[in-house]
Image: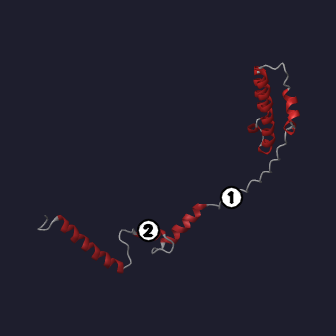
């Protein structure tokens, strides 16, 4: 207790007195805590030096920055050309490429499947040609699977 008041009560009294002061200052249009030098740096401020400060600032800006010209737009890439082997999608053409014979072993058939997939897998060609590559891979897998079944009989 300070001077027969609790600490809480003394804080409340002080806040009330500050509110009275702020109401009096509002009449003068002054913002509490605002530095007077701030007004000097604002165009049209209260001090005559304000215009000189603005001019000095503008002098230090230098020449205006001119943005560079935009780069020319790149030409659209030419559409990819379909490899000639992807045009051969018939069963007979794929069978001729695989060259499966009655002498083919299980190991040689697996090797033919791997080498054919390297050249024709749909993930390794342009998106425009995936349908043809898928058809070729499907036919090749069917032909090789049939040859494997014949070997196991």
Q: Where's residue 143, x and y in %? A: 81, 30
Q: In this view, does 31 lie above or below 69?
A: below
Which residue sits at x=78%, y=32%?
142
State the image coordinates of residue 54 (x, y, percent, origin top left): 53, 68
Q: Mark 1 or mark 2: which comes first in sequence?
A: 2
Vertically, is 46 above or below 109? below
Who is closer to the viewer here, 53 or 140? 140
Asked which quadrant contains residue 58, the reply is: bottom right
Q: Which residue is drawn at 56% across and 68% down?
A: 55
Which of 61 and 1 lies nearest the eye of the viewer? 1
Q: Quadrant of the N terminus?
A: bottom left
Identified at 27% across, 72% down, the residue is 18
| Image-quadrant location for residue 72 | bottom right
Image-based side of 88 in relation to 65, left or right: right
| Separation (CA) of disc 1 from disc 2 | 33 Å
Q: In this picture, is 149 found above or below 26? A: above
Mark 1 or 2: the one toward you: 1
Mark 1 element type: loop
Marker count (numbered): 2
Q: Left of 66 or right of it: where is 48? A: left
> To which residue does mark 1 refer?
67
């Amino acid at each position: 207790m300070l001077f027969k008041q609790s600490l809480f009560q003394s804080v409340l009294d002080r806040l009330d007195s500050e509110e009275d002061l702020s109401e009096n200052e509002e009449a003068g249009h002054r913002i509490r805590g605002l530095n007077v030098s701030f007004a000097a740096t604002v165009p049209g401020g209260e001090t005559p030096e304000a215009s000189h400060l603005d001019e000095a600032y503008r002098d230090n800006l230098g020449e205006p920055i001119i943005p560079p010209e935009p780069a020319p737009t790149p030409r659209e890439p030419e559409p990819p050309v379909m490899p000639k082997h992807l045009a051969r999608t018939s069963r007979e053409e794929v069978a001729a490429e695989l060259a499966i014979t009655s002498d083919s072993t299980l190991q040689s058939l697996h090797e033919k499947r791997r080498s054919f997939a390297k050249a024709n897998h749909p993930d390794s060609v342009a998106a425009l040609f995936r349908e043809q590559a898928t058809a070729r891979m499907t036919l090749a897998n069917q032909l090789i699977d049939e040859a494997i079944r014949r070997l196991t009989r």
